[in-house]
Structure formats: structure tokens, C-alpha cells
Amino acid sequence: MSSALRYEASAAESLYERLASLGDAPLSLDERRRLLERFFMLPSRREKPGRFWRVDFDSIVPDAGAIDASATISSAQSEDPAVVVCDLATAAREYPALLARAFGTTDVASTKFGALAKAFAGHGIFAYVPADHACDQPVVIHHRAPRDAAVFPWVVVLVDRGARITIVERLSADSGALVCGATEVVTEEHSDVTYAILQQADDTARIITSRAARPGRDAQFAWAAAELGSELTAGDLSVSIEAPGATARVTALFFPRGAQHVDLVSTVEHRAGEASSETLVKSAARERGQARFLGNIRIAPHAQGSDARLRDDALLLSPTAHVDSVPALEIGANDVKAYHGATVGAIDVEQIFYMESRGIDRAAAERMIALGFFEPAIEHFPSARLRDEIRAALTEKLA
């Protein structure tokens, strides 16, 4: 237990004991123990507590007594009979070969909390789209964490050659809940996948997620994440481009207010050339809301012909709100296009003056400007209904 000395020994021991109740699907007990050991050993690599940041990520450890291995926390809906959608236990039993093509094949468990999520993985969803099939209706995944519970939903998506699908994940959590979840998406050549997330947890919940995608040759893949709830939101969104011709898009928006804290990291790894990526992040903060965005673009030395772009804009709506924007480029090749830009600021006073001069009061003007600020990100979400839900949630935050 030497690697867990930073934590209460009794709490760490209780977690190891809790693993035994999870069974062997989709992981053996030995594998779970190694992953939990990795969680205790790894640093979070998140911002340390200081003037603005109130959260010490390295001290977060779930309460073993709050983990209910029998609870049903994930469900999925699909109207397409050709698409396989089931829970992880069923996938491990009935579709082991398909599950093995995706489960554990990304870097999603390489982070501290990704390792924790995998150690307790058991509840979750597996989705498979067969080759050359176009799924016209989105698959909808629901995760719900009960009050004061600690849950670890895991989603695995495998999309075969030439297939197309849209997945919408809805994540909610009651007061006091801890959600530590992960998503793996693996696609084959010429596929087209959009994975959207709408998180609207209770303001006292904590949401920590790790999500990784690996698109195939000439495939298109998009993340679109709206993180709008919880007391603490920490997320990793990553895409690993390992085949030429792939196109990746990462879109995220978040809006901490009150005492909410958001820490989002996006990473696009260009490990193959002649591929493109675009990252767009829009955020706002008001009252004592705090946020940090770290946007990584990494281009390997052999990934010639890569085209990578990142744009991050933050809007401060209160003098006590704070958002840090940290774009980062690591470029090892010399025949590439790479761009990043970031802005952090308040609403332009000239815009307010213009709208007030046309009879719009200041509060309404600020709401209209803030909603318009988010619109370039909202338009990347896959359905009119989902976009309207996001607009309504943002309007409520601006009220």
C-alpha cells in the first residue's frame, strides 16, 4: 500500500476490497487491482489549488461505501435493429470479439482518473455499427448517478468500415454524486461518427470524465461536449489520428457560475500525415465561476501534411469570475499547417451601447450577446432539439 500513502490507508484498502464485488466482466480482478494501483500512483496533472483554484484533484478518492455494484446507472435507446446496443456485461458475453476490437485499445486509461474509471468499469454501454450501414436516427445513451453515489459508467463504440452514426450521451447526477466515467470510440476507414455530450448534473455533484477516439483512414469523427452542470467538472477529450485522410473536430462549451469549477483538457494527436483537425471551445463565467481550458495539438515528426487548428474564446461576465486559456502546440514536422488562437475578456462596451441606443435594456443586451457568443459552438451539435436544449440551459444560467 506504499503507493497510496497520500490517501487515508483505510479508504484505499476499502476500495481494493470493493473491487472483489465487481466480477470478471469485462476485466479480471487482477487487472482491476493494477488499474487501481495506477490511480493511486499517478498525479492528476491538473492545476494545483491556489488563488483561483479551489480543488485539489490529487486528493479526490471515491468513498467505497458509496459504490453500488448492482445499481443500473446506464441505458441506451436505438431505433435501428442493425445496430448492436447493449450493456457491457452482455457485450462481454455475447459479442466478445467485437468488444475486444475497441475496449482498452485507446489511451483513455492512461490518466489518473481514466485508470480509476476502468478499475471499476462494469456498468456502461457497448454500441456497434456494421460495415456500410448508415444509422439515420441517433443512439441516445443515458447515465444517471443517484444521490451521494459513486458511479463509473464506461461507453465503448465500434464503428465498422463505411458506417455512419450519431450518438448523444446525456449525463445527469443527483446531489452529492461522484461520476468518474470514460468513453472509447474506435472507427474504421471511411466511417462518419458524431458523439455529442450534454452534462446537466446537480450543482453539488462532481463529474470527472475521460473520452478518447481513434478514427480510421479517411474517416470523419467529431466530439461535441456541453458541460453545463455540477460543482466540479473535469474532462479529457482526445482524438488520436493514426491513419492518413482522417478529419477530426472537437467542440466544447461550458459556463461555470456560482461556485462551479470546470477544468477541461482537449488533445489531438496527429500521428499520421495528410489529416486535419479543428478544435473550437467557447466558455463563459459569472459570479465566482472558475474554469481552465488546456488545448493540446501534437504533430509527430512523420505526420507531414497535417492541418491542425484550435480556437478558444472565453467571456467573463463578473469581476470575480476567472477563466484560464492555455493553447499548446507541439510540432515535430516541417510541412504542416498549424494555428491556435485564444481570447479572454468581458463583453465589448460598444456592443452594449449599440444595443441600448436601440431601446434594449442592458441586462437583455448582455444576455443576447452572450448567447450569440456561444452560437458558433452550438451549431456543431447534431440535432435541432439538442441545440435548443443547450440554448435554454445557457439562458437559465444568464437569468
Image: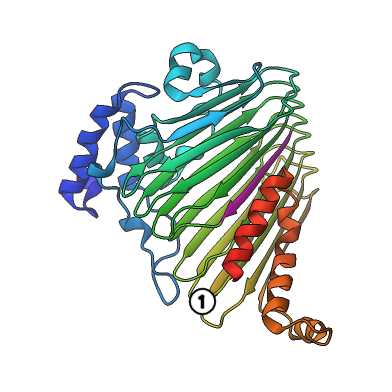
Instruction: Tell me which corner region of the image, top left, top right, bottom left or bottom right, holds residue 340.
Output: bottom right
Above or below — where is 388 with respect to 195?
below
Which of the image's four quarters has the C terminus? bottom right
Give the x, y percent position of residue 346. Answer: 66, 79
Instruction: Tell me which corner region of the image, top left, top right, bottom left or bottom right, holds residue 240.
Output: top right
Give the x, y percent position of residue 152. Answer: 39, 39
Identify the residue at horizontal 31%, vertical 57% (top origin).
Answer: 59
Point out the stretch of residues depicted in magenta.
Answer: 220-227
291 and 349: which is toward the camera: 349
Specify whether 246 is left or right of 259. right
222 falls in the magenta region = yes
Give the residue at mark 1: 287
| Count of marks overlaid on the render | 1
Tell me if I can see residue 302 in this picture.
yes
Specify whether 304 is left or right of 316. right
What amino acid does circle 1 point to? Glu
Give the x, y percent position of residue 15. Answer: 24, 40
Which of the image's four quarters has the N terminus? top left
Specify whether 307 is left or right of 221. right
Residue placed farthest to the left in the image?
Answer: 10
Above or below — where is 101 with respect to 123?
above
Crowding near the residue tagged with mark 1, few <14, some 14–19, many ≥20 C-alpha atoms within 10 Å:
some
Identify the residue at horizontal 29%, vertical 26% (top origin).
Answer: 30
Identify the residue at horizontal 64%, vertical 58% (top origin).
Answer: 392
Specify whether 263 is left or right of 1. right
Give the x, y percent position of residue 379. Answer: 75, 52
